[in-house]
Each structure stands twice: as C-alpha cells, then as structure tokens.
C-alpha cells in the first residue's frame, strides 16, 4: 500500500536517510525499529509531507505522493503521537473529535462518535468533559488512540506508542492497538524501540540502520535472523554497558 524507494534525506552536511527502501502491504502491521537518531521519525515525516526527501519516491497504491495527491492520502490516516499531543485547552471529547468538528460535522454527532471511541479504549463518558491535564499519562495515551481512530482511517501511524508508560500500562496500550487494528483492518506503521510493542502488535519488522533498511522480515523470524545489526539492536551493546558501569 505504501512504497518508499531509495529515500535520501540530509540536514545540512548530516545524512539521515541514505537510500531507505521499504513497502507496507495493505492490512499489514509494520514496525520500524532502530536506535535513537537512526531516522525513524524522519522517514515518517517524509511520508506525511512534513519533510521533503532530497531524492527518492513515495507512493500509495502505486500513485506517487505529490502536493496534488497527498491531501487525499492525509484525509484517510490517523496518528497516535509519542506524547499523545492532546490540546490542553480542549476537553477530551473535542480532542478526539477534533478532525470531525473541523470537517463541519455537527457537534452532537461528533460528540457521540467521540464517546464511542473513548469507550473503545476503555475511557467512560465521565472523562469526556475533563481536560488532558486532569488525566494520567496512560489515560492521555488512550485518548490519543481514540482520536487516531475517530475517522475510521485505513492507515494509522503510531509514534513510540508506549513511551513514558510503566510496563503494565504499556502492555495495555499494546493490547488495545493490536485489537483495534485487527477490528479495523487498517494498514499500520509503528515507530518504536520497544521490542514488546513489536512482538505484540506487528506482523513484520524493518530495522533502520545508518539510513538504510538493514533487515526486514516477519516478527516470528527475528530471533533466528543472522543480521548482526538486528542482533546488536535486540541484545544491546554489552561492551558499552560494561564500560558505563565501571
């Protein structure tokens, strides 16, 4: 569904993406992993049009994403941001229904949809008129997930969905993502360094290393993979840890 071909992107003299090529199949849950600064977020921003690649191409269903075609794509996607990114000045239901309201949907209908989406992520109607600052981090993340699915998109992006959560809440969010995506049949791309998120939510995984896809394959094949970059990422730099602890 989404095809990235030979994507290059530099900032000044610093190369970030150096020929990244990757495909997300329709209905697939794809996880992109990699160390901090490996270019995961930049790759996502290139898909969304927030950054322009220096070279390479991005296509959706075989149609190149351009200034003319990208709006159609953006009308059919949802996103869960790393920090939930809720609007502090809006009550929860308006955060969830933000896109619906700005498309001209009447408030009563938008609120009804928002309440249903909040219920789907385990937040009751009593939370609808509360403000983000009145919620825990886990509740904010749930609300962000409700907003991501408010328009029933066919493509959903997850940017570090469990960052800042304790292990129990992280498992809860991962389970919600897995179940909701299965229900919706959406194509998803998840950027994460959390291997529990990968194992819980993804069908296939791609490792971004030095600006290129160093390994990709089924999640079930990760442990037996012979890629040194993947092994290093999964196991961690043991020598460096030992040095740091001295």
Image (tube, helix red, strand yellow):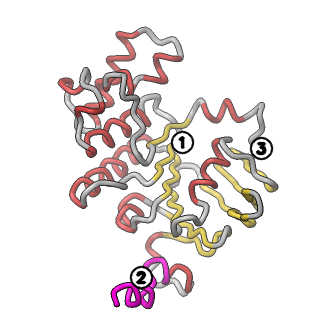
| Residue 244 visible in the displayed image | yes
Secondary structure of the residue carrying tag 2 is helix
Judge the density around disc 3: few (<14), some (14-19), many (≥20) Cα neighbours within 10 Å.
some
- Locate residue 210, reporting x and y percent: 65, 72
Q: CA distance from mark 3 to mark 2?
A: 38 Å
Report the residue at 68% width, 30% height from top: 71
Highlighted magenta segment, given as a residue range: 231-246
Q: Nearer the viewer, mark 2 or mark 1?
A: 2
Q: Is residue 234 on the magenta stretch?
A: yes
Q: Quadrant of residue 54?
A: bottom right
Judge the density around disc 2: few (<14), some (14-19), many (≥20) Cα neighbours within 10 Å.
few
Q: Is residue 108 above or below residue 80?
A: above
Q: Which residue is mark 1?
A: 155
Report the residue at 38% width, 42% height from top: 183
142 left or right, relative to 19: left
- Locate residue 241, reporting x and y percent: 39, 85
Q: Is residue 47 above or below residue 116?
A: below
Choose the circle earlier in sequence order: 3 or 2. 3
Report the residue at 54% width, 87% height from top: 226
Q: CA distance from mark 1 to mark 3?
A: 16 Å
Disc 2 and disc 1 in contact, CB within 8 angstroms: no
User: Tag on residue 64?
Assistant: 3
Secondary structure of the residue carrying tag 1 is strand
Q: Which residue is mark 2?
A: 235
186 vs 42, nearest the viewer: 42
Q: Is residue 157 above or below residue 217?
A: above
């Amino acid at each position: 569904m989404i095809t990235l071909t030979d994507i290059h992107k530099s900032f000044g003299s610093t190369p970030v993406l150096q020929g990244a090529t990757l495909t997300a199949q329709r209905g697939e849950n794809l996880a992109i992993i990699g160390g901090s600064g490996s270019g995961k977020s930049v790759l996502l921003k290139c898909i969304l049009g927030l950054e322009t690649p220096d070279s390479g191409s991005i296509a959706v269903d075989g149609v190149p994403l351009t200034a003319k075609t990208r709006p159609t794509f953006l009308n059919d996607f949802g996103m869960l941001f790393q920090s939930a990114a809720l609007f502090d000045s809006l009550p929860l239901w308006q955060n969830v229904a933000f896109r619906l309201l700005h498309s001209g949907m009447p408030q009563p209908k938008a609120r009804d949809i928002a309440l249903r989406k909040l219920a789907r992520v385990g937040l009751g109607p009593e939370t609808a008129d509360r403000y983000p600052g009145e919620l825990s981090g886990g509740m904010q993340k749930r609300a962000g997930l409700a907003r991501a699915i408010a328009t029933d998109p066919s493509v959903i992006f997850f940017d570090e969905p469990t960052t800042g959560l304790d292990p129990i809440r992280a498992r809860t969010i991962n389970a919600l993502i897995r179940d909701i995506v299965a229900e919706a049949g959406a194509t998803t791309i998840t950027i994460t360094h959390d291997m529990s998120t990968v194992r819980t939510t993804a069908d296939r995984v791609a490792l971004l290393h030095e600006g290129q896809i160093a390994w990709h394959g089924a999640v079930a094949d990760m442990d037996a993979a012979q890629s040194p970059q993947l092994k290093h990422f999964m196991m961690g730099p043991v020598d460096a840890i030992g040095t740091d602890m001295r």
